[in-house]
Amino acid sequence: MFSILIVEDDLKLAQLLQSYVEKYGYRAEAVQEFDRVMEVFQGIRPDLVLLDVNLPRYDGYYWCRQIRTVSTCPILFISARDGKMEQVMALENGADDYIAKPFDYEVVMAKIKSQLRRAYGSYALGKRERTVECTGLVLYPERLELTLSGKTVDLSHKESLLIETLMENSSKVVSRDYLLDKLWNNQQLVDDNTLNVNITRIRKKLSELGVEGALETVRGAGYRLRPFWREEP
């Protein structure tokens, strides 16, 4: 049974969400003390988080970043803030989707089910940790780690998705549109510079592993991760 953590300070709304989630056969728990969000998260290890933006003390963006340091589970923001910038900030801070209030509960449940399928459907037959490998690079998506020759760098959730896509298409040009859709689903909510920023971060992480120049920008087409070989000392 999948478990859902609800981080919403409107008690009535939190109770309604919990009731709806449980009605569909999921286990649900709502945070009661909003300075203990990570403590509760670590205690129950939910499969998905519903997270409000406006919270006491620290906002949802802060808690989203904290969760992303330990987990790649889907995070859905639910907020009365419906501006484009708020949605971009949510995605930039590691969220997988954004639902503006007031919302239809059926839509919320459809999005929850969709995210659970995307995140866990391919693991339904086993618990073995997944890895992605490419010319010596080894990505551990569930750990948010990238390794090469004994060295390891930590990744954000979006960085992990980005390098995974490039590794799986090694030597091929991957279009910007494909990457935007893969990482953010809804391209119109993402500023064109957002992908550039994440590409720059990936190049920096590769550089920390001793890999220079392998991630190419193909003008007018997209990006390509070229195979590379390092001579052993």
Image: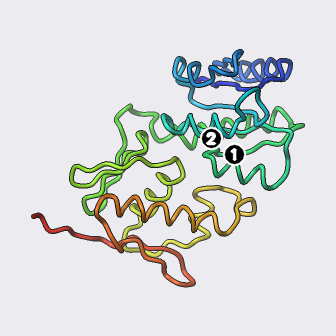
- Residue at mark 2: 115
Assign a secondary structure to mark 1.
Answer: strand
Q: Which mark is residue 97?
A: 1
- Dot in front, 2 or 1: 1
Q: Specify the amino acid type for callout 1.
A: Asp
Farthest residue to the bottom: give it. Answer: 219
Q: Residue 5 versus residue 105: which sits nearer the camera?
A: 5
- Give the residue displayed 63% in from the left and 47% down from the top: 93
Residue 4: give x, y in percent of width and height.
64, 25
Given contact means CB atoms under 8 Å apart, are the residues at marks 2 and 1 in contact? yes
> In the rendered view, does 205 fall on the left or right side of 159?
left
Inspect the image, locate mark 2, and give the three-letter code of the amino acid beneath it.
Gln
Give the total number of marks visible in the rendering.
2
Q: Residues within 10 Å of mark 1 (few under 14, many from 20)?
A: many
- 23 to the left or right of 141: right
State which quadrant residue 212 falls in.
bottom left
Instruction: Decide which of tag 2 and tag 1 comes sooner along the chain.
Output: 1
Residue at screen point 54% across, 40% down:
119
Give the quarter of the figure containing the C terminus. Answer: bottom left
In the rendered image, residue 202, in percent from the top left (x then y), is placed at 45, 61
Query: Tag 2's secondary structure?
Result: helix
> For the view shown, which residue lies furthest in the front direction?
57
Q: Residue at x 63, y 23 (%)?
A: 37
* 71 up-or-down from 7: above or below: below
Q: Is residue 70 left or right of residue 101?
A: left
